[in-house]
Image (cartoon, rainbow, N blue to C red):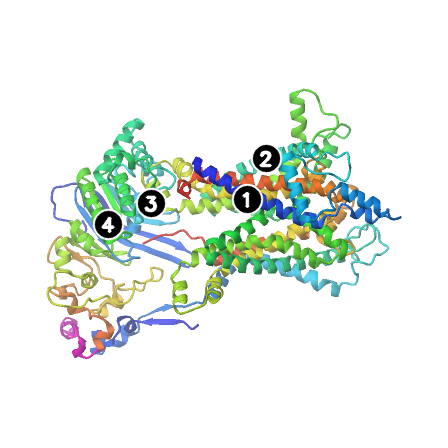
Amino acid sequence: MPDKKITAPDVIGTSRMTPMEQSGKGAVRADREFTVKVRTQREIVLSRFLKHRAAVISSVVFLMVVLFAFVGPLLWHQPYNVYTNDIEVPPSGTHPFGTDGSGYDLFADVMHGSARTLEIAASVAITSTLIGTIYGAIAGYYRGWIDTVMMRFADLILTIPALVMAIIVSDKFSASIASAWYFLAFILAALFWPICARIVRAQVLSLREKEFVEAARALGGKDGRTIFRHIVPNCMGSIIVVLTLTVANTVLVETALSFLGFGVRPPDTSLGTLVNNGQTSIQNGFPWLFYFPALFIILIVLSINFIGDGLRDAFDPQQTRVRA
Amino acid sequence: MFAFTVRRLLASIPVLFFSTLLVFLIVASSVDPLSPLRARNPPIPQQTIEAEAHRLGLDHPLLQRYWDWLTGLFLHGNWGTSVSPSYDIGQRLDSAFFVTLRLVVLSIVLSLILAVTVGVLTAVRQYSKVDYAATAVGFLFLSLPTFVFAILLKSWAIQFNQAVRPNGPPLIATLFEASPNPPTGFFGKIGDAAGHLLLPTIVLSLISYASWSRFQRSSMLEVLNSDYVRLARAKGLSRSRVLFRHALRNALIPLSTQVALDTAGLLGGAVITETIFEWHGMGYMFIQAIGNYDLYPILAWLVVASSLVIVFNLLADLLYAVLDPRIRLA
Amino acid sequence: MTAYSNLTTGSDVLLAVNDLTVDFPTADGVVRAVRGVSYELRAGEVLGIVGESGSGKSVSSMAVMGLLPKSARINGSITFRGEELLGSSEKQFMEIRGSKIAMIFQDPMTSLNPVYKIGFQLAEAVLAHHDVSRQDARKRALELLEIVGIPFPEQRIDQYPHEFSGGMRQRVVIAIAMANNPDVIIADEPTTALDVTVQAQVLESLRTAQQETGAAMVLITHDLGVVAGQADRVMVMYAGKPVEIGGVDDIYYNPRMPYTLGLLGSLPRLDRREQSRLTPIQGSPPSLLSLPPGCPFTPRCPMAGDMCVDQEPELLITDNPGHSAACHYSALLVGKKPDEVFAASAEDALMPEAYGGETGAGTGTITTTHEETAA
């Protein structure tokens, strides 16, 4: 939007009010301007986000990791699942991250592991946020017994430790469909959606009391329309923050599952499985087998956490109030 | 207050009931104790499989099995039958529970003390060096997976032990919850337990500390900017009185709920920690049962875990009501 | 001495604020919230400070109490009983707050700590400054509740704030302010957040508080009606500076600054016999981030001239020694009524007279006078 200039005559309302104009000195008075730049919400959020140094740096880092994970394999000569003759070789030119006990190139392994971890995290985050938003919005909007029943069910799912439940159920799935990661993603999404639902519900509960909702309904809007065209867009801030944090959480849970052997399984690999393979190698003299995959997990989660923090600040800055 | 407690208690019972139902349905459909038998080569005769199915009660419809199990548990204290006939679920649960309990409780206490202290400190000194440093450290711990941290600590401890006392017993225990030949005497035992508790507790507490301290910081900041804190200062009260009696008192309320909600996650985290440090607690019991496709110990584990979560939620509700008089009417 | 010092009535000057400025550095620049406030408060008198949001009235009072955030840059002087307050340590401020100078805040719903009983919060105020027993503090609390007019104080004293209505909570806040018989009570918009019917009750409690303690009071509000009934002297603030100071009669009957005139004109009056329209002041207060030179009221002022754009007027004494105004053309306002200077609304000014429009309202007289003075 262009800069909107408020000129003095606009403020007063009529030039007839300005004696100076009548006496010919109007030019001086009328030109007194106060420049007020009107910004869209998107611009405001973006500019606030960019002020958050850690978030900006993390965005860059995260982007680099994504490129590394998905574009890397196209450029790197060594595939992850083909073993070489270099057994347990420390990091060098041909193998920047070294190799493991079977001769697999760790560099390629980490690339593929990161890609797998990121794929799972992204799909879980999007799915659970989508389900959670719809669920929470409906519960918060209708309140009453619908809300109570819906949220009790959501709370029920939250009483079950996610990791444990995933372990139990993953057993069944992987037995029939070997290493299909989307089933793992499905399970995790089913365990994580209540978190988003809770947050969206809380927001909707407070927003539905606002006047714009009354206005929308007075205009004859149907419930579904009111919820999804009016209320939910106002929750966007919280939703986006939950989305990013779910990504981080999923990475942590999925790598833990894979570490224990219940998540992504061979021949597929994830960063968790790599850490599992490398856990004794620190003592045995091949520390790179542990440190590189571990480093990447930390890098991914850390950058997402900072991005989430920056987003949270951008959508809802905590400022100290000073009233004049 | 009493009426409130009773109401909340009564409300927890249906939750527990539905929780067991949900858990049973999911677990019973996922875990098949007969699968290792079926997969054997050369194959086992069908009769043996059916006999085993009958022994474990698997030949009944799902809902009936649920009912049998539920009534068996709550009316007769019968945890169910394991695939290994000598496995007494109740007994195993008992010992495993107390092993895990001391780890989880100690971690929560340590976490809370650290989180509240750092949360208050960083809120009061917002934007100072201390604040930035604590925030950076907090983020790091938030992004550190439990298993990575545990493995790191374990390997450093091993190196430390080798450097300090290469030929004797390890100074910092890296495995098990107690030494195979524990020292005698009260203090000896405590010392031994402490030495073994050190690493797992650090792992478990530092990760929940990270999220709680950030939570406490933002809660504290909100309270410090409130009108009633401003009025307290305007009354001429001392800084410490305003900080502790007025600000902290209010800022702790949301944290108590958050801690209760996080207990479910803590139980999961304990599984990983126990696996890496080879503790014979609930986590170990669980993983073992999974490996054996042993249905009933898994169910027992989940019942205990869910009950713990429900109890913690109840405690959080009560604590909230104690701390915030506005809630008592609800 | 300053241009606005009062006639010496013989009473002591309790609080003297001299050229107070408060700046807030923000991410977008420096906000100059207070740009040179000076006033004197004598024992027993009520000073009303009037202004819109953003005029700096609350910030200047928070500076007196030392309650501004650490990032605020404060200059000038604030003396209480001759002793300089600015630059005092927190400990020194603590001794004054609540016992010598007390403050009442705007929103009663959030001013009280929700987790403590009000008896506790009242007693706390007493115990902070006097070494008395708990029972004595409690007795004093009961006394205070009675004075401000809370019914059934023996039961109410053990209740929580959420069991009180807004008006009652504000009365409790007043009671807390009175607790130690302060010399000065600063009431920052005490009735703004309340219903009109409740406002009267709270103002009554405020009056009682002032009488019981004999304190001088600074009553900050944007509501001229509130000030009319309570204040002895009035200070009108705009954009961080006082633009008019004087006795309450002077301000209400002989305003000498267009802003004051405009404020009076925008008040609905029950005592007008003929039907007349309200004359609002168009526009909004300026941003304190980037204040242009000259008088900040210029864009909204129907009388603004060339001088107003370039030079900020100083507070100068008018024909009455106790009354000062900051306007280059303050002499022109003698005897003027609000609707003679401000038009009812922009649209009205353009409407045909038959429908109540006014043609060139106010411009005729002023223009000629302008040209006279300009010449």
Report the magenta stretch's main SS. Answer: helix
Instruction: Please tell me the numbered disc located at residue B105.
Output: 2
Q: Is C242 on the left-hand or right-hand side of A236?
A: left
Instruction: Please tell me the numbered disc located at residue B302.
Output: none
**Residue type, label 4:** Val
Circle 4: element type: helix
**Residue type, label 2:** Val
**Residue type, label 1:** Pro
Reading the image, the residue beneath label 3 is C111
Q: CA distance from mark 2 to mark 3?
A: 38 Å
**Residue type, label 3:** Ser
Q: Which mark is in front, 1 or 4?
A: 1
Chain under disc 4: C
Chain under disc 2: B
Chain under disc 3: C
Mark 3 and mark 4 lie on one chain; the one further toward the N terminus is: 3
Q: Is residue C172 magenta?
A: no
**Viewer-proximal residue among C319 and C260:** C260
Q: Which mark is in front, 3 or 4?
A: 4
Q: How crowded is the residue under tag 4: few (<14 C-alpha within 10 Å), some, or many (20+)?
A: some
Reading the image, the residue beneath label 1 is B14
Instruction: Please tell me the numbered disc located at residue C198.
Output: 4
Q: Is residue C356 magenta?
A: yes
Chain under disc 1: B
- Magenta segment boundaries in residue numbering: C351-375
Q: CA distance from mark 1 to mark 3?
A: 40 Å
Q: How crowded is the residue under tag 1: few (<14 C-alpha within 10 Å), some, or many (20+)?
A: few
